[in-house]
Amino acid sequence: MAESAGIQQGSPAIGAAGSVPAAPGAGATEGSGAAVGSARIALKKAQLRCSPRPKKLEKLGVYSSCKAEGACKCNGWKSQNPPPSPTPPRTDQQSNAVNLQEPCRSCSHTLGDHVTHLENVSEEEMNRLLGIVLDVEYLYTCVHKEEDADTKQVYFSLFKLLRKSILQMGKPTLEAQESPPFEKPGIEQGVNNFVQYKFSHLPSKERQTIVELAKMFLNQINYWQLETPSQRRQRAPTSTDDAAGYKINYTRWLCYCNVPQFCDSLPRYETTQIFGRTLLRSVFTVMRKQLLEQARQEKDKLPPEKRTLILTHFPKFLSMLEEEVYSQSSPIWSQEFSDGSTGGQIPIIHTVISAPPVARPLYYSTSPVSVVDPASSCGTGSVSPAMKTAAVLEPSPVGEKRKLAEPAVSQEETKRPKVVGDIPMDLINEVMATMADPTAIPETSLLSAHSARDEAARLEERRGVIEFHVIGNSLNQKPNKRILMWLVGLQNVFSHQLPRMPKEYITRLVFDPKHKTLSLIKDGRVIGGICFRMFPSQGFTEIVFCAVTSNEQVKGYGTHLMNHLKEYHIKHQILNFLTYADEYAIGYFKKQGFSKDIKVPKAKYVGYIKDYEGATLMGCELNPSIPYTEFSVIIKKQKEIIKKLIERKQAQIRKVYPGLSCFKEGVRQIPIESIPGIRETGWKPIAKGKELKDPEQLYSTLKTILQHVKSHQNAWPFMEPVKKTEAPGYYQVIRFPMDLKTMSERLKSRYYTTRKLFMADMQRIFTNCREYNPPESEYYKCANLLEKFFYTKIKEAGLIEK
């Protein structure tokens, strides 16, 4: 049953709920009331939900109306001996003192009379109601601390809504004249249209830069602290209509976007997805000015790889976007927007709900990785792990580099036959001697476009900017305040980056002593981590959660995290990872060496991890001979060695031979291999396929092959020319279209005088398909399968060598 309460449209509210009013703009800084309040509420909820059931009933009784006979009007149980100030739920000492027969100070009926309706309620439902209770208490504090009357009114409306939800055991639903989204297209869609409209003609690398700028801009809007209507009137007096419209949008923003960051009982939406051009126009000028000023002030703090992007490209991007925001005729705000440019396809830019604004830099990245596994659970009636168990920081070997065993060259090794193409070790040593310190990593702030994904993260680790620690709870060690705070930070990162996962479940696993988490620490705070559970007896580890906070992504942290995790497990002699990845995480895990081909026998993991819908089981087998954290450096050094070897080879083959004199003596033709120096260049005779000289035989063979191809089950997309109505812009992207119908006509007209012409046209079909369609499309897959079938038939016909 969903209950709702009215929210007065037009009541302004202020940025960080429950905190001292913050200045509008880029948001709170680290340690602000917003961030601390959110972490404190999350910890309180985790503690309360793990309390004994009598303690939960006592807490809910305070907000439950009396059910005693006689139509008692008491709307909440009140203790005879109330504490002097509100105190957080405690552990065993208090739980024993709960007495359901204790009378209410207001109506004299017992606590049991107030909670009779909760006797048969499940633990899950009770935990949900307890979450609302803590949100109510937090909003109550906000109401008393807030000085602005209009803001206080909105807080009070939300307070009453949640209070009513507890009394009626319903779900809080905001009642308003309109529900999200409030304007179409939304800001996110408008920015997508802008990128497509203005930049689709650019090369791939430049397009990706624009996409990164767009993501950065959308992220800033999602966590932008709007100024109150009164502040806006003082700064720039506007018309009555504009002021009223802003006031309505401001109230909606508070109720649907801002307060739900801290009170997760309320549904939360992204600002960029439910608001459109109207709100963007009202904040864009101020936002642009403050963002550029912030960039100039923080330029020395920006990562080197982001400095040019933010200081040079971002201002130009904002200027171009500003024209479209305020232009009356801009097409990007039309719901029927379609781009007819001839450029490449630009990926749709999405924003994600991530952590509350804590020291947000001016850069942002792609959507987070999400890995879920509801296999583990703790008893709902147990004491909070944060209160009863202690957190322990392992003497982490993560920061250390694994020493590889020196390969002992045995006598049998020396007798082993050399593989064709092997480079003599003496030559490699000679080349390395000419290279400047081949083991050193260049400490440069400028990373090339072809740098490894984790190169920036590796450099930051060497400079001490970031640290990696394996942490977890312990049942037998003294609590460590710093590690407890890191665990809470990890719970926050996972909760906000994986919004579809229940927060209670995340908290339970992060604080579960059986689980450990590889944490990524930057400036003393957690910015990412991988939660895992090791099964040494089964020979594998299950990865449960994996996330990096959104404003710290695309720096190689995710790759470097996984590499450290691999090194950690090799030291503990566990060489297999298993994880369930959702559709957003599959790409990340593929890049880290995971695949759907599971090497662990099924009998080893069945019953240890839970199989569930909507996720893909992926595995990764570790090689103990590979130093994963330095692997990309090794590859880079190998490339440099190969480059030097090629340069040496080129120097050798630049020898000038005398001209051929045999033609003066009447020789008309000589074999290519007899030309002096030809073999030194690396030339080898090319094996040729069988070329049918008889035109009729060639026609008959090609006709048979074409019939086989047209009859194949994956040939249906290529039977006829592509219609413009079915694929808009196809002929702007594909300059040389081809299809099986056209090939049939060419075959009949005897166009294919050689097998090469026929094969070139067929190959053109497959190439065009892959160029126009994305790899995950059905057409792309059909092209790959049909191509494989085609070359099988060509080989069977003897037109190319098998």
Image: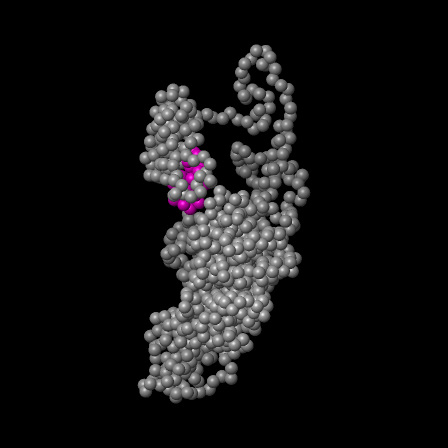
Q: Nearer the viewer, residue 492 or 11?
A: 11
Q: Considering only vertical position in the picture, is 59 above or below 721?
A: below
Q: Can I make out residue 265 in this image? A: yes
Span of residues in magenta: 763-785
> Residue 459, can we see it?
no
The image quadrant of residue 778 is: top left
Which of 328/343 is in front?
328
For this rendering, which residue is in front, 132 or 543? 132
Position of 294 with respect to 188 (left or right) is right
Residue at position x 65%, y 49% in the image: 444
Q: Looking at the image, which residue is at 33% across and 39% down?
A: 713
x and y percentages locating residue 294 in the rendered image: 62, 60
User: Residue 775 colored magenta?
Assistant: yes
Magenta-drawn stretch contains 263: no
Residue at 39%, 35% (x, y): give it: 739
Quarter holding the C terminus?
top left
Q: Residue 569 at what x, y percent from top left? A: 51, 54
Q: Position of residue 155 (x, y in %)?
A: 48, 74
What residue sits 47% from the left and 76% below the top?
156
Q: Main secondary structure of the magenta part?
A: helix
